[in-house]
């Protein structure tokens, strides 16, 4: 008896699958124009949404903040930073003169040394501060409170 029930169940399953396949084939053949039109419409809708979001994305805004420096407070050198970096008084003087905008030749005339000595002091200041250029050294010197 079990065998007959299993056989009829299997036969009914195959028959239902065949009918579904026939219905699917009829649907695809009969309504192919609508199916392809729907697929193309979905693609263009997705493309339109993507393009709309891409074109209407908000632009980045740059915020400029004004910083007020209190001129009334006297400059106080951070001696701990000077000691930690190992800067000599002459190197601090050279750094200050670089911050004043003097060239190597003008610095040499002002401190009564040769231009090569100024270059040596400058390179040592660059090494100790980790700077590559004069402007970077001056900026680091001011941010570390080594020079006013």
Image (cartoon, rainbow, N blue to C red):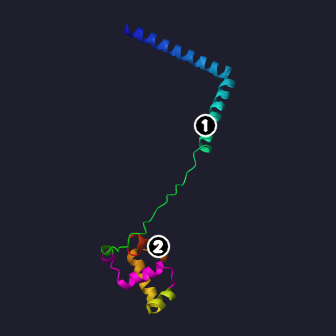
Mark 1 Cα-neighbour bin, 10 Å: few <14, some 14–19, many ≥20: few
Residue 17 shows up from this direction: yes
Q: Earlier in the sequence, mark 1 or mark 2?
A: 1
Q: Is residue 48 left or right of residue 12?
A: right
Q: Is residue 7 magenta?
A: no
Assign the C terminus to one quadrant of the image.
Answer: bottom left
- Report which quarter residue 80 is drawn in: bottom left
Of 31 and 9, the residue lying toward us: 31
Q: Main secondary structure of the magenta part?
A: helix
Which residue is depicted at the point 42% across and 72% down? Answer: 142
Q: Is residue 141 left or right of residue 21?
A: left
- Report which quarter residue 121 is drawn in: bottom left
Of 60 and 43, the residue lying toward us: 60
The residue wearing badge 1 is 49
Which residue is depicted at the point 68% across and 19% down? Answer: 30
What is the x, y in percent for residue 24?
Answer: 60, 20
The numbered mark at residue 136 is 2
What is the x, y in percent for residue 129?
Answer: 39, 75
Of 28 and 120, the residue lying toward us: 120
Per the rendered image, the range of residues in magenta is 82-103
Residue sitting farthest toward the front: 72
């Amino acid at each position: 008896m079990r065998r007959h029930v299993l056989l009829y169940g299997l036969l009914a399953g195959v028959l239902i699958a065949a009918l579904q396949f026939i219905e699917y084939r009829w649907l695809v053949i009969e309504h192919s124009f609508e199916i392809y039109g729907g697929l193309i419409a979905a693609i263009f809708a997705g493309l339109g949404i993507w393009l709309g979001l891409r074109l209407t994305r908000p632009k980045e805004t740059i915020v400029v903040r004004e910083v007020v420096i209190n001129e009334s407070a006297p400059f106080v050198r951070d001696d701990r930073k000077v000691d930690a970096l190992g800067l000599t008084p002459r190197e601090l003087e050279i750094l200050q003169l670089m911050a004043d905008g003097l060239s190597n030749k003008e610095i040499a005339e002002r401190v009564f040394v040769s231009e090569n000595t100024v270059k040596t002091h400058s390179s040592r200041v660059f090494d100790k501060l980790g700077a590559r250029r004069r402007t970077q050294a001056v900026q680091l010197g001011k941010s570390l409170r080594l020079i006013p």
